Image (spheres, rainbow, N blue to C red):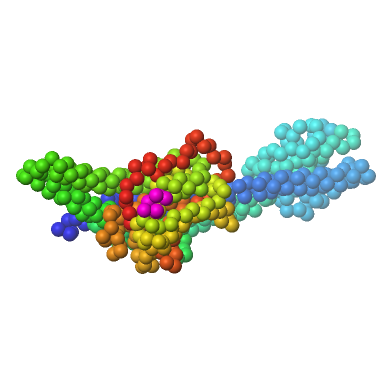
Amino acid sequence: MNEQGAARVSLPEAGPRHLRALRSSALKLSVGYIGLGLLALVLFAAPLWYAWRVTIEDSRMAILQADAQRLAQVFRREGPRALAGLLSERVGLQIANERLLLFADPQLKPLAGNIDRWPAQVPLTPGFNTLRLQLDGHETEVALVHLLLPGGYHLLVGRDTGFYVPLERRFWYALLGAAVILSTFGALGGILIRRALMARIHLVRQTVSAIMLGDLTHRLPAEPEGDELNTLSQTINRMLNQIEQLVHGVRNVSNAVAHDLRTPLAELRVRLEELSLTRPAPEHTFAEIDAAVSDVDRVISIFNALLRLAEIDSGMRRSGFVPVDLAEIAAAAVDFYQPAGEIKGARLQLVRADTAPARGDPVLLAQAISNLIDNALKYTPAGGNILVSVSRRADQCIELAVADSGPGIAEGDRSKVTERFYRGDASRGTPGVGLGLSLVEAVARLHGTMLELEDNHPGLRASMVLGQDTRPIERPATAVPKPGELQHEPVYL
């Protein structure tokens, strides 16, 4: 059975192995990096090649021009016969086709040099030309400088441009070798990266499969510090912790709701059944009906509190955030509960700043303050003190606190009292279902803060801190709600 379940929840394969490899993110990244590397290599080689070509062309032309000018000076000083002899001597000493020389008369008849006739491609006007000539039976690209000498004589000085071809060929071979090396190491790097990624992904697959099988405690291995994948693992683990907490919370809430609804519904059924069987006098009947209405109100209060908590947890109430004055909201709540404090024999006091501007939902903030005062009144003995304070701290944040002189909460239970339907030993015989501080904690979380519970020596001090809002408070739009207008239910701790 377990093997079948494992087979049902196993993650689907992406296809044949070679197709998965081709669609791999690591392969795509490797191909992208190889492409970028080749592009960088081309962008590096292109200006280098251009500079090389320009430098070679300029230096070749400068050398040919200088050589031609020296020969022209010999012609001017010693005449055509001396120049012809010099050219014949140089042709006999140089390597074949190392330097192309031609001295011609005004009719373009060769007088000296290693070119047997005047090239037809060379124009009669002086200048620098690059053309192809037949040399030793094969066509060769040459660079020529043409000078027009006194008396109509012509002088050609040239050189085979193939002199630098071997060097250029080595350059291209080196560039090709660099591209091959870059591609090879890029491909090897892609394979290694894919293997590393697949190993980490396999751990994620195992964790997801275990969670799908119901093991919510399974987590990804993660170190306090690491690479980006380790950071992702930590984020996933935090998400899994939140999911596990929510699942357990839903389970606990369901159990608590079933348990807390069973008692009032059972009492309601017993009363109605007794009325149906005994048919008592009208006075007794109406008394039982009033008690049944109280049971129904208690059930409705539980559902209203749960719906309010769900609405807060969803974040929908953030759209109702406006500039508010916490001092005014606290003062209204204290005024509402002052008579209850006098009946209890407890002294309820308010210490407030002149203004305490903040941004939030005025209805929810009033509900949170009311729940804190409710809770303090419930557990503060006669003659005790309850202090509600709204103050501006040194960092300009607004602190709201309710402190009482009751029995307080044990340090080990403070992390539990904000759980829904949790009731400590001291609250077993008191009315309520354990949603009061849960609602306060949810309101604090909605406003970007948290509920702090501290020992008041004696008693409990509950506080939350909100950021100051300096925008003007629009009184008509943010009228402070009366606690009695909030459909407040006695959801004590």
Is residue 412 or residue 36 the one in the foreground? 412
Seen in the picture, residue 208 relative to 122 is either above or below; the reply is: below
Give the magenta part as a residue range. Answer: 337-343
Image side of residue 222 versus residue 150, left or right: left
In the image, residue 452 lies at what x, y percent? Answer: 44, 59
Instruction: Considering the whole magenta stretch, tell me its main secondary structure.
Output: helix
The answer to whether residue 230 shows anywhere in this view is no
| Quadrant, the N terminus | bottom left
In the image, residue 345 lies at what x, y percent? Answer: 38, 57
Q: Residue at x 13, y 47 (%)?
A: 271
Q: Residue furthest right?
A: 77
Q: Is residue 356 magenta?
A: no
Is residue 290 or residue 19 the one in the foreground? 290
Image side of residue 286 versus residue 94, left or right: left
In the image, residue 143 lies at what x, y percent? Answer: 73, 42
Image side of residue 378 versus residue 397, left or right: left
Q: Residue at x 50, y 34 (%)?
A: 476
Q: Residue at x 37, y 51 (%)?
A: 340
